Image (cartoon, helix red, strand yellow):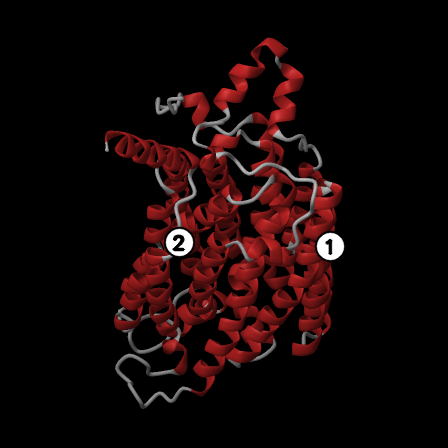
């Protein structure tokens, strides 16, 4: 069978209609998060503690604890199929978290009470992301997983851009109370919208709408190519455990590569706003205002959306591995520049505008979706989420502790204060992850594998 390499029409480049409730929910969710998260580290530094380690601990420990909930609920979702209900419950929990945080900030925030609130609700809130990823890749056409993963991040970026552009306005108007109240309302809306989504796998949805005489034509379209090595993973009766999925060599290599990358990126990710405010308050340049911090997030997200418009189609029509390698390569390059240009605030601002997530996240999700069956997709996606949460936050605590104690007189040109050491972590560990991505990560795109298998078969036949 020849693979369909014809350019997709404009309609085929748009999201399938059955994905719109989930994608819209994702947008609203990211409006909620970005409307407070951009300044949350600054709120903690101003109201709770000026220790970088305390800030990292408040944000990291609850996130790591959330892995328990993600693991349990992902397993339940794969057994019961109640993904939509879990998505709604997660958003209700997030709304309650924001409301309680609002009250605590009013009566007097402390390290312990902020930590407790985030830890308790984190058990329920993070399952939203794995279930959205699992459900979108189940109900989408099988040969558009890469494109759909990019849609997901595109709609998330749209929400982040809207929320970040509003966050500074809300902060100036009502402070942290306004940011949290705004976030709570939109978290609830995100949960309600998701309930309008279908849960039918794409193949079942199509069979309900098409005459049986066209079934063979549809089965051909959704890729059942020769040779058998590239057949899609079929749903099985046996429920694979997390360990069963993780011990597949191809998935394990991807998870380890991402873990090393996120271990290095974690410190910067947790205290981004604190880092930029500190840098801009030194004699090197003027203070970085709240408005400039918010605008930097808005611009970076807008650039990310442009990348996401084309990245999904590229993922589906070319190999996953080259895109994955490029996405990892950007980390050591950008953070090396950030470290050596730390005395050039506007250079740092320009470097930050490149959205690292725009290729890394959809590519990683697509690779894992390629390697998992429908009835284990929730656990497969949760492995990516668990890796990001655990290693990103462990890295954050280690990096921020070092930033607290690192002396400013060792290499004062580049590290006049401890926080300036933060870019070193993604610079070094990003290089290690790049080596693994190049040498060990395997291609997973069925179309590319089909072409490779066809070429090899031709070469063998010519011998």
Q: In the structure shown, which secondary structural element does the residue marked by tag 1 occupy?
A: helix
In the picture shown, does residue 240 fall above or below 195?
below
Image quadrant of residue 410? Answer: bottom left
Image quadrant in which the C terminus is located:
top left
Task: Give the tally of numbered discs.
Answer: 2
| Classed neighbour count for the residue bearing mark 2: other residues with Cα under 10 Å, few (<14), some (14–19), many (≥20) | many
In the picture shown, does residue 366 fall above or below 284?
above
Q: Residue tagged by mark 1?
A: 93
Task: Give the residue drawn at x 61%, y 49%.
Answer: 130
In the picture shown, does residue 110 fall above or below 157?
below
Residue 134: mark: none
Q: Nearer the viewer, mark 2 or mark 1?
A: 2
Instruction: State the separation of the CA atoms marked 2 and 1.
Output: 37 Å
**Percent of width and height locating residue 47:** 60, 75
**Percent of width and height locating residue 156:** 52, 45
Image quadrant in which the N terminus is located:
top left
Q: Residue tagged by mark 2?
A: 441
In the picture shown, does residue 116 fall above or below 167?
below
N-terminal label among 2 and 1: 1
Q: In the structure shown, which secondary structural element does the residue marked by tag 2 occupy?
A: loop
| Classed neighbour count for the residue bearing mark 1: other residues with Cα under 10 Å, few (<14), some (14–19), many (≥20) | many
Q: Is 373 left, or right, of 408 in this rendering?
A: right
Residue 427 visible in this rendered orientation of the protein: yes
Q: Is 410 left, or right, of 135 in this rendering?
A: left
**Percent of width and height locating residue 61:** 62, 71
**Percent of width and height locating residue 364:** 46, 50
Task: Give the residue drawn at x 72%, y 56%.
Answer: 72
Q: Is 318 left, or right, of 81 in this rendering?
A: left
Task: Give the residue drawn at x 71%, y 36%.
Answer: 195
Pick whichever, 62 or 147, lies toward us: 147
Pick whichever, 386 or 444, lies toward us: 444
């Amino acid at each position: 069978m020849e693979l369909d390499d014809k350019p997709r029409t404009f309609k085929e480049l748009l999201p399938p209609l059955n994905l719109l409730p989930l994608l819209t929910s994702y947008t609203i969710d990211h409006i909620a998060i970005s409307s407070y998260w951009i300044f949350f580290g600054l709120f903690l530094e101003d109201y709770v503690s000026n220790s970088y380690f305390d800030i990292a601990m408040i944000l990291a420990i609850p996130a790591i604890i959330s892995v328990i909930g993600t693991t349990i609920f992902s397993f339940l979702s794969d057994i019961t199929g109640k993904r939509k209900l879990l998505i709604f419950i997660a958003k209700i929990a997030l709304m309650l978290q924001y409301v309680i945080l609002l009250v605590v900030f009013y009566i007097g925030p402390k390290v312990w009470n902020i930590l407790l609130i985030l830890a308790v609700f984190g058990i329920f809130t993070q399952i939203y992301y794995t279930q959205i990823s699992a459900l979108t890749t189940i109900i989408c056409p099988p040969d558009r997983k890469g494109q759909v993963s990019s849609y997901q991040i595109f709609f998330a970026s749209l929400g982040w851009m809207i929320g970040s552009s509003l966050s500074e306005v809300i902060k100036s108007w009502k402070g942290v109370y306004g940011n949290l109240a705004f976030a709570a309302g939109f978290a609830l809306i995100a949960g309600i919208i998701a309930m309008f989504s279908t849960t039918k796998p794409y193949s079942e949805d199509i069979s309900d709408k098409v005459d049986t005489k066209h079934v063979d034509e549809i089965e051909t379209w959704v890729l059942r190519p020769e040779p058998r090595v590239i057949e899609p993973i079929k749903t099985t009766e046996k429920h694979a455990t997390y360990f069963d999925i993780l011990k597949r060599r191809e998935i394990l290599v991807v998870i380890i590569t991402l873990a090393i990358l996120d271990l290095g990126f974690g410190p910067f990710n947790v205290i981004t706003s604190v880092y930029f405010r500190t840098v801009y308050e030194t004699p090197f340049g003027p203070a970085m205002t709240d408005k400039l911090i918010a605008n930097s997030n808005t611009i970076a997200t807008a650039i990310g959306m442009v990348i996401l418009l084309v990245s999904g189609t590229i993922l589906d029509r070319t190999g996953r591995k080259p895109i994955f390698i490029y996405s990892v390569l950007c980390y050591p390059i950008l953070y090396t520049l950030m470290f050596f240009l730390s005395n050039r605030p506007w250079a740092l601002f320009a470097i930050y505008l490149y959205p690292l997530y725009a290729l890394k996240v959809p590519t990683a999700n697509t690779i894992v979706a390629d390697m998992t069956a429908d009835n284990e997709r929730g656990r497969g996606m949760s492995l990516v989420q668990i890796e990001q949460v655990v290693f990103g936050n462990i890295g954050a605590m280690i990096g921020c502790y070092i930033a607290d104690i690192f002396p400013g007189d060792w290499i004062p040109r580049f590290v006049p204060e401890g926080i300036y050491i933060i870019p070193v972590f993604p610079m070094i560990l990003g290089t290690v992850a790049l080596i693994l991505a190049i040498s060990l990560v395997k291609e997973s795109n069925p179309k590319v594998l089909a072409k490779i298998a066809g070429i090899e078969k031709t070469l063998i036949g010519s011998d």
